Amino acid sequence: MNERKMILGDVWNLPREVSEVTGKDPGTFLQFNTHMVTFYQQTYGELSRFFLALRDGRLIGSHCGTCKQVMVPAATWHCPTCDFAEMTEVDLPHRGVLAATAPITIFPSASFIGDAPFARGYVDVATDAPIASFLPSRLRTTTGLPRPGIFVKGVELKPVFEDVRIGSIRDIFWVPMSEVPAKLRDKKPLLASALNFETPPAPAVERSTAGAKALKDALAAMKTLAGKIDKSPRAQKDLSGRTHAIGIKTGGGNFTLHVASSAIRIEMGLPKKPDFVMVAKDPAIFTRWVADGSLTDAAVEGNLWLPHKEAFGILPILDRLPRSVRRDVK
Amino acid sequence: MNKVAIVGAGITDCRSRWVEATYWDLFQRATRRTLEDAKITAAEVDSVVYGIYNDIFEHQAIPESALTGMIGMNLKPGTRVTSGGATGFYAMRTAIMEVASGVSDTVLCIGGEKATDCYDPQSKSATPMVIDTIAKSWDPFFEYPLGATAADSYMQMCMGYNDQYPNDIGDSVVRAKIIEMLCRQGNKNPFGQRRDETVTVEQVLASRWIIAPFLRLLEACMYTEGAAGVLFASEKKAREISERTGVPPIWVKGVGAANESYQAGRGGSYKPLHSIVSDRVAAERAYKMAGVKPSDIQLVELHDAFIAQFMITMGEMGFVPLGKTRTLVDDGIMADIRELGDTKRPKKGQLLLNPSGGLIFGGHFVGGSNMFSMWSARREMIKRQMPLALIHGTGAINAVFGGALIVELEDGGVR
């Protein structure tokens, strides 16, 4: 039997207590744990038609016969610019165009921790209409994590419907049409199970002499860091309870970053059973990481390829290590 | 419309968290300082307008009800204004209209916020919960479920602008240079939250990403706890108070406001993604009412939620061309506070922008941030003898709420 998902998990709760707190001014002050939570059974009301259509695998908009605009999603059935004239339902095509380059969220709000990085953007669906609103949309790629250069203004997109739909805007998302096999491009609805998001192909990386030299430097830097971690309680705490074998392909060669027993170990070559494989054309990003740089930034900027968000979640922990070592040396 | 003047202003210390004070106390402190500045008692105030962004941060529905007696406004009319990030601007607009209509002679406009008592048990920190609360400015049907936040809505605007005008706000070094300059200005604000910090271009460029590719941590405004007040008065009352304090009145010359549609789209009345039309229209309305042009104004306190948006807004308000807002740095249009010191006016063709340090270095307690900007503009006008200033406010998702106030120093400076 499927586990029933609740709105709030245990992690959202706090013990009922009053604690002492200090601030900028002298003295001790008190703070109490409390909450301001309201639960809803929120009606979709007039929006229900749009969400019922989504459940049926259709996209609909509301059309005004006077000004010819199409509202996507169908957010009202009375045209706000034509004295609230009655609007009619129109079926929308299963393709659209990204209206503006999409931002990629790295630091999300509390409700979306664990989902980052993710892209959200506005899709122009009713492209034949002279006036149209844009559909707020989740944007996904079959090529790994979202990164700059994929969701740019004007890119053609295909809506993908979740196999199980409940009547939510998260029942659909959009992928670049170029990532959809030709035989599926006209499919209505295209289901998520028809595409592969779980095992994106790693990009090829060409080896070079410069890359080999950069890798040599990076390996030396990382081995030095590994030695310092062995003497740093803060860094060991960062790694506590973690075991990973991360394969890394670079333009200078491949290596493995092992995390185990609150330590890291570097080994040449890829592991037989990696947790995941990262790809970096330039191995120097690992030298910069050790010098207080950021693997997270490298991934965000598209210089470090990752297959999924679970891999992305490990990067902040690795990014903390050089800082933790430095703080313990101080 | 009757003449309206600013005759007093006061703010609290801006802090990341005030464990020493509730919002009751913060509002009372700001009220006390505002009235002390104008040398009047609470009894002389006719009416109060509260700027309070939301009930969740204050953790009380109708939070202004608890303030009435606490700030000496018992049995006086009180109006609470809430308009997203532009709450402070709209609260001041409401107070100005009350005086301009002749209904009241003296109106206290007081705003503040206590946001960082919020707590996220997952990360064991305040910020994700503060972001989540603000993210609920989005609707629960289409936008919030996608993980939309206020910051990413502003960044969507910036990316739309960048699509339209490449090679302007996309240069991270230009953005970082503006931040370095704002930091120096923030160092001079005795109440500023980050007055003791030094932030360099290099630090900005090395700070972690919040939203790629236009928002690093050091490019964003802060969450601040604090409060600020501004006292508005009729002409007769303003002259009487000015006589008492020896401080010249600052006259309200222009008020412009415009809110765009919530829905983004193409054509019609939809919100365009490449432009902050609300800022442009609000500023144009304020210029028209004041009878001035952007080139007449050399002092601006701009609602800099994010530095890329700061640049776009400067373009929208007509201070620099759209698509060439980087000229603020490239052409030295943004005056360097190291050259101006504490009393000099900027040279012709230069602008003094956010001498308070803005919302990035000074403070951003949403309900009162624009009053904080007004406090700073008044202070600078008096000490530098600058005749005109523009105070800007923006808010709501996608920056769809816009407001601009133009004020003039009586007998101040040389035109």
Image (cartoon, coloured by chain):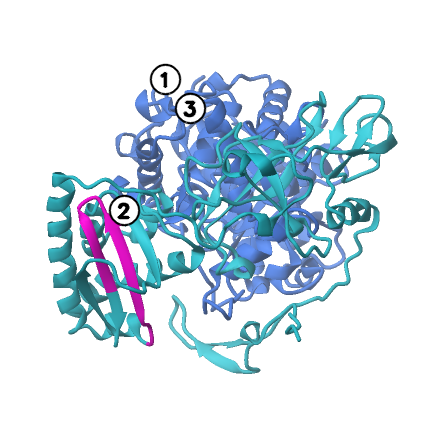
Chain colours: A cyan, B blue
Q: CA distance from mark 3 to mark 2?
A: 28 Å
Which quarter of the rendering shows the N terminus of chain B? top right
* Marks 3 and 2 in Cβ contact (< 8 Å): no
Is the C-beta separation of discs 1 and 2 under 8 Å?
Answer: no
User: Does residue A120 sit above or below B353 in this rendering?
Assistant: below
Predominant SS along the magenta part: strand
Position above or below: A165 against A150: below
Give the side of residue A73 with respect to residue A181, left or right: right
Magenta segment, which residues?
A241-257
Q: Earlier in the sequence, mark 1 or mark 3?
A: 3
Q: Residues within 10 Å of mark 2 (few under 14, many from 20)?
A: many
Q: Residue at x 47, y 20 (%)?
A: B322
Q: Nearer the viewer, residue A266 or A325?
A: A266
Q: CA distance from mark 1 to mark 3?
A: 29 Å
Camera-nearest label, 1 or 2: 2
| Foreground of the two, A73 or A94 | A94
The residue at which mark 3 appears reads as B166
Q: Looking at numbered disc 2 in the image, what kind of residue is underneath it?
A: Ala
Residues indicated by labels 1 and 3 sit on the same polypeptide chain: yes
What type is the residue that disc 3 sits on? Pro
At 52% from the left and 67% from the top, the residue drawn is B119
Q: Residues within 10 Å of mark 1 (few under 14, many from 20)?
A: few
Check whether the beta carbons of the residues at disc 1 and disc 3 lie within 8 A of each other: no
